[in-house]
Image (cartoon, rainbow, N blue to C red):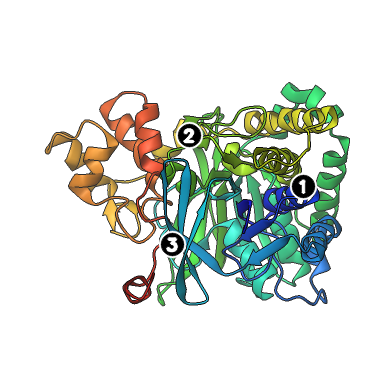
Amino acid sequence: MHNVVIVGAGPAGLSAAIAAAAAGAPVLLIDSNPRMGGQYWRMAADSLENQIDQHYDLETGLLLINAVKARKEIEVWSNAQIWSATHKDGVNTLRIIHQDNEKIVNTKNLIICTGAYDRTLPFPGWDTPGVMTPGAVQSLLKGHAVLAGKRIVVAGSGPFLLPVATGVLKAGGEIVELIEANKPIRWLKSFAAMLENLHKINEGYYYLKTISTGKVRPRFGYAVVRAYKADNDELDSVDIAKIDRNFNIRKIKNIKCDVAAIGWGFTADTSLAGSLGCKQIVAEDDGVVIWADDKQQTSVTGIFVAGEITGIGGSELSMAEGVIAGISAAKFVGCKVEIKKAHIKRRAKKQRFATALIRAYPIKSGWKSWLTGESIICRCEEVDLNDLKHAITELGATDSRTAKLFTRCGMGLCQGRICGRSVVDLVADNLEISPTDIDRIAAVNRPIITPIPLGVLAAGE
């Protein structure tokens, strides 16, 4: 019997599992990956040979992973995909594909630590083979020890670009360009948050030092705005533009490369929590996250959340929230344990740094000016910008949901995970209105949490 069920074995989930188990609660830890660690501590194998170079802080990850393995109170299900979830009469029902069979878990006490995935912005040619996200490049390196290409452009916005570029260089790849859309001067607006998190500056220095050793000089105030195919239909080159503070193009030059890793921060994965009816809100960066109180409990009694699902903030904030969520969940099932002031102070400190991150790396509206009418917006259903405009001007769509129904934009295999947020922005822009919270939240909700084969579903419980 599992008193506490945790979904996600990244920094937040591992921390929550240890905290709950230490309080005396039996734990079931469910994760979709073959090994614990999440995206942050993803590893190609249990052996650590040739893996240290791909991690800045692997020691912390190994401490947490080994602590989970050592706890007899914790059972781990790896390679487990939750495809459906419902909440009724205080019970959460999770339908899970594990070891090629469907299993059903019922629990009144759940901690959701599903993390986040790369945010993308569409631009002409972004559907070209060889254009990918920084997270995909890093997953290949960490999870499979595979270098995505030889000549790589790393671009977009956010500190995540630095460890990706570092990983590519250490794996023997060439960084043709490392470009950041925003300028570092924006950090001066959050000087106090920097001072109380000086170790993060040391981490940034580590990445920049490694990058400079590879003779790479980062460019600020630039973005990739177009990609071109070679005769074999694979990536040949990209246009790099100097942009103004609103991301409007000022000057363009073309760069040859075989991979372009382009990302614009992260989008919280709220699919599971949304299916269970947890309250969703729009964060400062316009992304949708799950609301939580000071004990990490959601609007649904007995469901707790931790990590990027509550707002993008990095591994340290995820761990701080995970500890509080684990303690809260253990207390919920009757364990005699309390959240300490030190836990609250640590979380608050990391939250201030997370807020500084959001303000240092905004995504400005000028990116929409990079598009042409033929630019693909939904790659799954091959819907372009002209299709979206037609749905508005000719078919009368007055919101992103209606435009989606008219065009099938966001109704393909990924169910809008990639394009949903951009569709909301583009539809609102063409209607000359501001996106509503209702539209933003609707874009992230989906009935099938993870696509699964019909044969597996038919053979389920």
* Closer-to-camera residue (12/218): 12
Task: Identify the residue at image location x=66%, y=27%.
Answer: 294
Disc 3 and disc 2 in contact, CB within 8 angstroms: no
- The amino acid pointed to by label 1 is Ala
- The amino acid pointed to by label 3 is Tyr
**Mark closest to the chain's N terminus, 3 or 2:** 3
- Identify the disc placed on residue 228: 3
Quarter of the figure that contains the C terminus: bottom left
Task: Identify the residue at image location x=52%, y=61%.
Answer: 132
Estimate the spatial distance between the alpha carbons at disc 3 and disc 2, rounded to whole Å: 20 Å
Q: Which residue is mark 1?
A: 19
Q: Secondary structure at mark 2?
A: loop
Other-residue count near label 3 (Cα within 10 Å), few / some / many at <14 / 14–19 / ≥20: many
Estimate the spatial distance between the alpha carbons at disc 1 and disc 3, rounded to whole Å: 50 Å
- Residue 229: image location, x then y, percent: 42, 67
- Residue 364: image location, x then y, percent: 51, 32
Estimate the spatial distance between the alpha carbons at disc 2 and disc 1, rounded to whole Å: 47 Å
* Closer-to-camera residue (23/1): 1
Task: Identify the residue at image location x=55%, y=60%.
Answer: 260
Q: Secondary structure at mark 3?
A: strand
Q: Which residue is mark 2?
A: 248
**Mark closest to the chain's N terminus, 2 or 1:** 1
Q: Please tell me in which quadrant of the rendered image residue 197 appears.
A: top right
Q: How many marks?
A: 3
Q: Nearer the viewer, mark 2 or mark 1?
A: 1
- Residue 155: image location, x then y, percent: 60, 51
Quarter of the figure that contains the N terminus: bottom right
Q: Please tell me in which quadrant of the rendered image residue 202 appears.
A: top right
Q: Nearer the viewer, mark 1 or mark 3?
A: 1
